[in-house]
Amino acid sequence: MPAIAARIGAALLAAAGLASVAGAVGLGPLVHSGVTNSERKGFYLTLINPYPGRERFRLYSVGWDSEAPAGEVLIPVPQPALRGKSQRRLLVVATGLEPGEERRFRVCAERLAAAGEGIIHARVCSKLTARRLG
């Protein structure tokens, strides 16, 4: 009987975790690439607020396979606020591209939570590839 209770408890805990992630911030497209003839390549990303009320979010760039900050990525509005159940189109710009260079990085978004609120750190990241013609 204790094994059944433990399994039921684990299933309820997993379901609660999925419910909280389902309401997490949205960012799209999740993968995008582009080619430019200049030292800059811009990408439009759509940030989605699934929550019922106004929320503030944090956008930041990191490496393709690491959490190290990605260099030379401009995010003009790094902490946008969105009203409940809405979305906003945002510009992200890879700068300083050398001729023939390909730069791969991620742009991540997360909700700025009040201090002490929740223990789940939910975020979503878009993988972006910018390439400059030679």
Image (cartoon, helix red, strand yellow):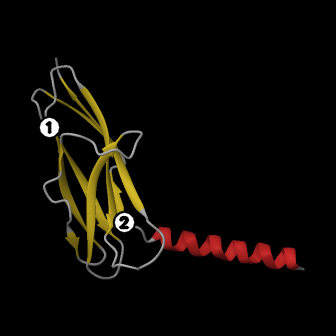
Residue to which mark 1 is pinned: 95
Q: Which residue is mark 2?
A: 25
Is 92 located above or below residue 19 in the figure?
above
**Residue at the outermost bottom position:** 53
Q: Residue furthest right?
A: 1
Q: From the viewer's perspective, is 83 left or right of 114?
A: left
Q: SS of the residue at dot 2?
A: loop
Q: Amino acid at mark 2?
A: Val
Q: Residue at x 28, y 78 (%)?
A: 84
Residue 122 sits in which quadrant?
A: bottom left
Locate residue 13, reporting x and y percent.
64, 74
User: Type of residue at label 1?
Assistant: Thr
Where residue 65 appears, x then y in whole percent? 42, 39
> How packed is label 1: few (under 14 Cα within 10 Å), some, or many (20 or more)?
some
Judge from the rendering whether residue 5 lies leftward or rightward of residue 16; answer left or right: right
Instruction: Write the residue at 34% across / 48% down.
Output: 126
Left or right, residue 20 beside residue 7: left
List x then y, in percent, for residue 29.
33, 50
